[in-house]
Image: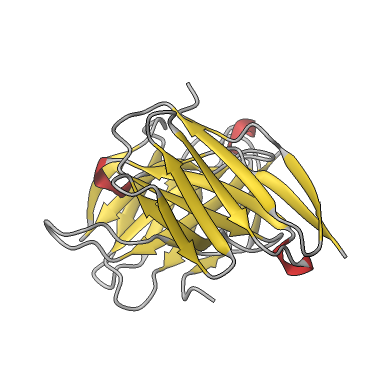
Amino acid sequence: DQQVKQNSPSLSVQEGRISILNCDYTNSMFDYFLWYKKYPAEGPTFLISISSIKDKNEDGRFTVFLNKSAKHLSLHIVPSQPGDSAVYFCAARAAGNKLTFGGGTRVLVKP
Amino acid sequence: ETGVTQSPTHLIKTRGQQVTLRCSSQSGHNTVSWYQQALGQGPQFIFQYYREEENGRGNFPPRFSGLQFPNYSSELNVNALELDDSALYLCASSLELAGGAKNIQYFGAGTRLSVL
C-alpha cells in the first residue's frame, strides 16, 4: 500500500521555465511534508517543507503548495536551472518522525 | 555537505552472509533513522534510534537490527542476507526534542549493498 505517490516518473523542462512536481498521499495522519533532492552518488538533500496547517511555503525559487482536502502537494521551481536536474522525492511525516517517501520524479532541465 | 557519514560506500556479500553498516550522525544530533532504497524506488523506513533505544520500526523482518552508541553513531546489521536485500542503505540524523517539534532529517550518501 503506497501511502505517498509521485505519479510522474520524469519531467523535462527548458531552462528558465517553471517545473511543477506533484505528490499525492492517502494517510490523513501525516502532519508534515518535505521535498528532498537527490543527485547520483549522493544522499537526499532537504529542499523545503510544509506543515499540514499551512497551504503554502516559499523559499527562494522553491514553493510548496498543500491541498489537504485533495491530499495533494506540489513543488514549483521558478525559474528552473540546469543545476536543478536531479531526482526529487516527496516525503510525508507521521508520528515518531518516520518519513514515508514517494517513488521520485527525475527532473531534467535543458539549457 | 550534511555532516552525516556512512561506511563503507560499497559492499558485496553473498546470500546467507551477515553485514554491518555504519553511520556517524551530524554533530549535535541525537536520532538516527535508517532507510532502504531499492533501485528506481523511494527510500523505505527501516527503523529509528533515539538515545540508544529503538524508537519505531518499519515493515522489515527481525533479521534487520540496529544499535545506537552513546556518541549517537549507529549500526545497521542484516543477518541471513537475501538477494532482495541488494539496495542503497541510507542513514539520516536529526535532533529530536522530547515533547518538541520534530526536526529535519539529514541524510548521508549511503552504502550500496550488492548480494550475490
Residue B38: x, y in percent? 62, 39
Residue B66: x, y in percent? 35, 50
Return the residue nearer the eye: A84 or B83: A84
Q: Which residue sits at x=28%, y=53%?
A: B49
**Residue B95 position by quadrant:** bottom left
Q: Which residue sits at x=40%, y=60%?
A: B105
Return the residue nearer the eye: B77 or B107: B107
Q: Quadrant of the C terminus of chain B?
A: top right
Q: Is residue B9 left or right of residue B76?
A: right
Q: Is residue B26 left or right of residue A65?
A: left
Name, please, the residue furthest toward the right. A111
Q: Is residue B98 left or right of residue B25?
A: left
Q: Which residue sits at x=42%, y=26%?
A: A26
Q: Quadrant of the N terminus of chain B?
A: bottom right
Q: Is residue A59 left or right of residue A7?
A: left
Against A97, residue B84 (above or below) is above
Against B103, residue A13 (above or below) is above
Q: Which residue sits at x=51%, y=32%?
A: A24
Q: How is the image coloured?
A: secondary structure
Q: Is residue B12 visible?
A: no
Against A9, residue B68 (above or below) is below
Residue B111: x, y in percent? 59, 57
Q: Is residue A79 visible?
A: yes
- The number of callouts visible is 0
Residue A66: x, y in percent? 43, 43
Name, please, the residue furthest toward the top. A1
